[in-house]
Structures are given as C-alpha cells and as structure tokens.
Amino acid sequence: MKLLLDTQILIWASAAPLRIPLAGRVLLEDGQNDLYFSAASIWEIAIKRSLGRAGFDVETRVLRRGLLDNGYAEIPVTSNHSVLLENLPAIHKDPFDRILVAQAMAEGMVLITTDEMISKYPGAIRRVS
C-alpha cells in the first residue's frame, strides 16, 4: 500500500515516533507499505517554524534528508494536485491539509493522519488514533 503521511505524523516519525498512535506505527513498520511525504509538508514546517509555531521545531533540511535516508519517497506538488482542490468539499480550511488530500487522491495513496477533520474527506484516508 502507498502511504502518504500528513505533516504531524512526519514530525513525530522523525523526532518522537512513540507519539504516533500504535495503528500508525504498525502501518509505517510494515515492509509491504511504501512511505511517502509531500513537498507541501516540508513547506508547511518551514513556514510554521519560521513563525515560531509550537510543534514545528524541526529543521526542514534535516527532516527531509532523514526521510529520504530512511526510504521515504518525496511527492512534489503538481498542477494536477492543485486542480483537484477546486472540487474538494469545504470541510477543512487549512491549505496544507487540503493539498495532502488532493495528492493522495491523485496518486492513489492512502493519507495517514491523526486529524479528525481531514478524515472527513472522501477517498482513501485513514485516521489513526
């Protein structure tokens, strides 16, 4: 299964893996699953870190390198992903979360999240708690 991790789970995977709910850790540790992260997540962390937001105190360069070194693949944001945003229901206002939903849909991936709002979108979204 192709798994796209939301930003919070990426941060936890790199800095505090035990914060990921057990169901999420099981998915990440299953060698049958391919793990992906979005360039949008790196962008989100960089912006929120520069604003001093709590929970975003990870260096993006170090995070990205660690993800790649540990077998995660990076998904760029494309215009195709952006076009899909137009038809997403207005469930969540966060543009970073919305692009992750669109990317998962476009790429045939399962978006892994702990966010209840994200899990309300249609499509292959798995909320782990």
Image (tube, rainbow, N blue to C red):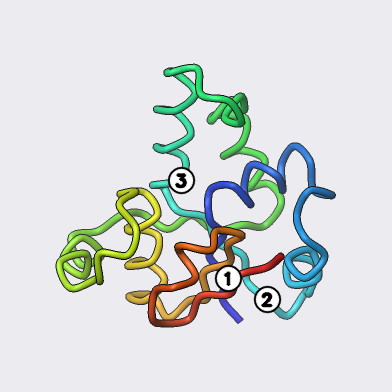
Residue assigned mark 1? 3
Closer to the chain start, of discs 1 and 2, is: 1
Q: Secondary structure at mark 3?
A: helix
Q: Identify whether 113 is placed above or below 23.
A: above
Q: Residue at x 46, y 40 (%)?
A: 42
Residue assigned mark 3? 41
Foreground label between 3 and 2: 3
Q: Secondary structure at mark 2?
A: loop
Residue 54 pos. (x, y %): 58, 25
Q: Identify whether 112 is placed above or below 10.
A: below
Residue 68 pos. (x, y %): 61, 48
Horizontal side of residue 66 vs 126, given as left or right: right
Q: Residues within 10 Å of mark 1 (few under 14, many from 20)?
A: many
Q: Residues within 10 Å of mark 3 (few under 14, many from 20)?
A: many
| Inter-mark Cα distance, 1 to 3 | 14 Å
- Quadrant for residue 115, please give it: bottom right
Tally the numbered discs: 3
| Inter-mark Cα distance, 3 to 2 | 20 Å
Closer to the chain start, of discs 3 and 2, is: 2
Closer to the chain start, of discs 1 and 3, is: 1
Screen quadrant of the N terminus = bottom right
Residue assigned mark 2? 33
Residue 100 pos. (x, y %): 40, 60
Horizontal side of residue 117 vs 33, given as left or right: left
Horizontal side of residue 65 vs 100, given as left or right: right
Asked whether the beta carbons under mark 1 and mark 2 sit within 8 Å of each other, the answer is yes
**Tag 3: amino acid:** Ser
**Tag 1: amino acid:** Leu
